[in-house]
């Protein structure tokens, strides 16, 4: 039975994936050709497996019309904040990534124009050309009405903690839009022990890779340079909220010991940046204890709802989160008003 609208709050899902057929076809052609076992594992599976899971995800990803709206209705989702699925344009060469991001952003913005009551979106960009990436984020936000930008962790093994990428942070801070760090598989230099155990995907590898990327951004001093920048991470913060105490302690002693040239003193503690510059979404987490822990430690204004459609599409999770034992005012922040404020919906 479909989940009814909630009279007390809208349900806004903030990490919902889409991919146009032409990009999926490019993914299929790329499998086995770019020396990235993580990409081969992920897209080899979703684009060729006869399993019900792969087939369903594959079909749902490509729909921006009736099927998606019907699925949203069935789970009581009022609004979806859409983005190009992982790894987005980042598996392509730099020039292709820049031009494909433009095309994908135009397509997604058109879908939002068709259904402004149901869809909003965040913009893709090709990180390897940071100046062009910044221009595209500007265009997508100012001209297309997109609500922020998103990237899928490493780009051919490179991390945005490298200052050569920092134009991307600068433009998001200047436009006052959130920058969403979404997972992808670990890069070639890291993936072997994950892959041999079948743990490279969303089950675990995604979280390790993305938590590491967020931490590299934090420890590189990005938020000292761009103190008003706001980022989002999914999957209840890729485990980082649970690490905060140890990160503060060990980062502090390591910096003071001058053990690594790359770890310089920061203006605030790691946990301060997580509490003041990072939002956490519940994508893939229909689990009340984790959500309450994040609300308690990061603040109720920092935690917001996401489903992770179509990779996670479970009506029972919506029911479970609807019945969380938290005050209604906090539930409304979680499902609705935090997303409205952060993404300026
Ligand atoms: Ca996702």
Image (cartoon, helix red, strand yellow):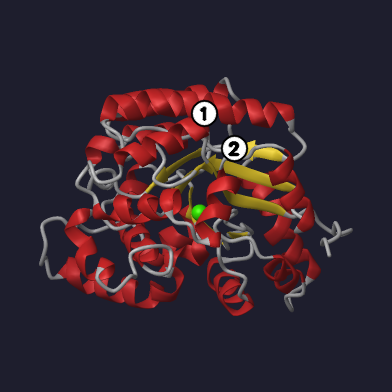
Q: Is residue 86 left or right of residue 74?
A: left
Q: Are marks 1 and 2 in contact (CB under 8 Å)?
A: yes
The quadrant where residue 209 appears: bottom left
Tell me the quarter of the image containing the C terminus. top right
Q: Which residue is mark 1?
A: 105
Residue depicted at x 13% and y 70%: 257
The quadrant where residue 213 appears: bottom left
State the image coordinates of residue 28 (x, y, percent, origin top left). 37, 41
Q: Viewer-proximal residue, 110 or 145?
A: 110
Residue 211 visible, this angle: yes
Q: What is the CA distance from the residue labelled 1 to the residue labelled 2? A: 9 Å
Task: Tell me if residue 44 comes above or below residue 120 in the rendering.
Answer: below
Residue depicted at x 53% and y 48%: 58
Residue 182 visible, this angle: no
State the image coordinates of residue 197 (x, y, percent, origin top left). 29, 74
Q: Viewer-proximal residue, 130 or 97?
A: 97
In this rendering, the count of numbered labels is 2
Residue neighbourhood size for the residue with mark 1, other residues' Cα within 10 Å, grouped as few (<14), some (14–19), many (≥20): many
Sequence-earlier tag: 1 or 2:
1
State the image coordinates of residue 137 (x, y, percent, origin top left). 46, 29
Q: Is residue 310 left or right of residue 255?
A: right
Q: Which residue is mark 2?
A: 121
The quadrant where residue 113 appears: top right
Residue neighbourhood size for the residue with mark 2, other residues' Cα within 10 Å, grouped as few (<14), some (14–19), many (≥20): many
Q: Is residue 176 left or right of residue 249?
A: right
Residue depicted at x 60% and y 28%: 109
Q: Viewer-proximal residue, 200 or 133?
A: 200
Q: Is residue 341 left or right of residue 30?
A: right
């Amino acid at each position: 039975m479909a989940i009814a609208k909630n009279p007390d709050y809208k349900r806004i899902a903030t990490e919902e994936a889409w991919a146009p057929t032409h990009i999926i076809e490019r993914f299929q052609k790329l499998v086995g050709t770019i020396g990235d076992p993580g990409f081969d594992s992920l897209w080899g599976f979703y684009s060729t497996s006869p399993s019900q899971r792969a087939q369903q995800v594959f079909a749902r990803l490509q729909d921006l019309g009736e099927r998606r709206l019907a699925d949203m209705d069935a789970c009581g989702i009022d609004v979806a904040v859409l983005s190009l699925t992982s790894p987005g344009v980042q598996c392509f060469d730099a020039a292709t990534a820049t031009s494909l991001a433009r095309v994908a952003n135009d397509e997604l913005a058109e879908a939002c124009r068709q259904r402004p009551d149901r869809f909003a979106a965040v913009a893709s960009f090709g990180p390897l050309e940071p100046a062009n990436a910044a221009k595209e984020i500007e265009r997508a936000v100012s001209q297309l009405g997109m609500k922020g930008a998103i990237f899928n962790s490493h780009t051919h093994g490179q991390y945005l903690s490298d200052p050569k990428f920092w134009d991307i942070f600068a433009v998001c801070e200047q436009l006052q839009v959130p920058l969403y760090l979404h997972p992808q598989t670990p890069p070639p230099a890291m993936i072997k022990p994950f892959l041999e155990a079948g743990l490279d995907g969303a089950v675990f590898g995604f979280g390790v890779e993305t938590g590491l990327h967020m931490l590299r951004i934090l420890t590189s001093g990005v938020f000292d340079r761009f103190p008003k920048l706001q980022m989002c991470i999914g999957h209840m913060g890729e485990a980082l909220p649970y690490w905060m105490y140890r990160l503060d302690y060990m980062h502090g002693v390591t910096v003071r010991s001058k053990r690594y040239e790359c770890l310089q003193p920061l203006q605030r503690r790691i946990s301060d940046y997580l509490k003041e510059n990072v939002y956490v979404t519940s994508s893939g987490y229909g689990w009340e204890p984790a959500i309450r822990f994040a609300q308690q430690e990061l603040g109720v204004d920092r935690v917001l709802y996401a489903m992770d459609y179509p990779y996670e599409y479970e009506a029972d999770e919506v029911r479970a989160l609807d019945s969380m034992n938290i005050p209604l005012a906090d539930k409304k922040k979680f499902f609705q008003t935090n997303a409205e404020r952060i993404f300026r919906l």
